[in-house]
Image (cartoon, rainbow, N blue to C red):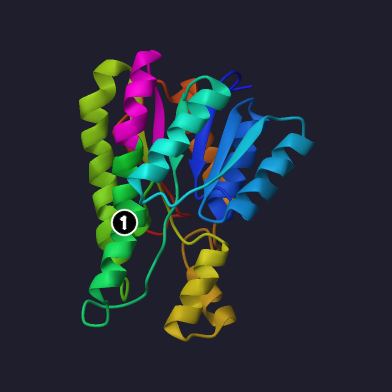
Amino acid sequence: MRLQNKNAIVTGGAGGIGRATSLAFAAEGAKVAVVDLNAEAAEAVAEEIRAAGGTALAIGADVSSEADIERVVAAVVDGFGGVDVVFNNAGIIRRTTAVETTVEEWDRVFGVNVRAIFLMCKHVVPVMAANGGGSIVNTGSGWGLKGGGQAISYCASKGAVVNMTRALAIDHGPQGIRVNSVNPGDVDTGMLRDEARQLGQDQAGFLAEAAERPLNRMGQPSEIAAAVVWLASDESSYVTGSALVVDGGGIA
């Protein structure tokens, strides 16, 4: 198993890509801390892992809060003995233009999508460095690599994630810490369906449009999870600072 004896944190771990990755990490032998704003949903995923014979901890947290991030890292160190892998996956989207976006919405998107990754790295890097290294994977987006319409705060935040990942890789590579981003296209999740609601569009039509790419379909959460497992594992031991695109050819 590729993550045997590894201790992992997954933020936004209760649904979609986060849930799929939590389960995939556990299947590869990792102990998994499932972190989510929805503590009850996080516990449900942790219970799935335990039912399959794995080890999991559920932690309710607002990842944009430094106090909550400090609590998460401390709980995982206390419960598992250290941190080897982090998947900074928590994210939100607001489908609005600059004119329509409120300052509060802008700040919330950046709080969850960008500030949270900074905070996690600020507090987990010293733990990883003291243990000889680790792997951090951040969720970017195809829209962090190119523009997208009616999603200005999301596009800007994901662009920040991609470049923050590169900076982190440069700073902490000498400590044995690899940092990469995974950049999905449209994936079959509740978040994607909520975009249709925000835009006031018919869901079936919106999802059909999301499938318009060379592979003629949306991605599945398990497919993104597979890429994250690879980045988290020693199979990608010489990969750092990369922006791995997993989008069915959407930005090709």
- Tell me: 120 left or right of 24: left
- Tell me: 201 left or right of 137: right
Above or below, comparing residue 176 to residue 227 in the picture: above
Q: Nearer the viewer, residue 65 or 28?
A: 65
Residue 169, given in percent of the width and then of the height, sits at 27, 30
Above or below, comparing residue 107 to residue 220 in the picture: below
Number of other residues with Cα within 10 Å of mark 1, as a class: few under 14, some 14 to 19, many 20 or more:
many
Seen at 51% across and 54% down, the residue is: 37
Write down the quadrant of residue 102 in the picture: bottom left
Magenta-drawn stretch contains 29: no
Residue 82, given in percent of the width and then of the height, sits at 48, 21
Residue 242, given in percent of the width and then of the height, sits at 32, 36
SS under mark 1: helix
Write down the quadrant of residue 112 in the picture: bottom left
Residue 9, given in percent of the width and then of the height, sits at 50, 35
Seen at 57% across and 65% down, the residue is: 190
The quarter in which the N terminus is drawn is top right
Q: Amino acid at mark 1?
A: Gly
Magenta-drawn stretch contains 129: yes
The quarter in which the C terminus is drawn is bottom left
Q: Nearer the viewer, residue 237 or 101?
A: 101
Write down the quadrant of residue 199 in the picture: bottom left
Q: How many marks?
A: 1
Q: Is residue 238 at least partly visible in the picture? A: no
Q: Which residue is mark 1?
A: 111
Q: Is residue 100 at least partly visible in the picture? A: yes
Seen at 73% across and 43% down, the residue is: 48
Q: Which residues are magenta?
A: 121-137
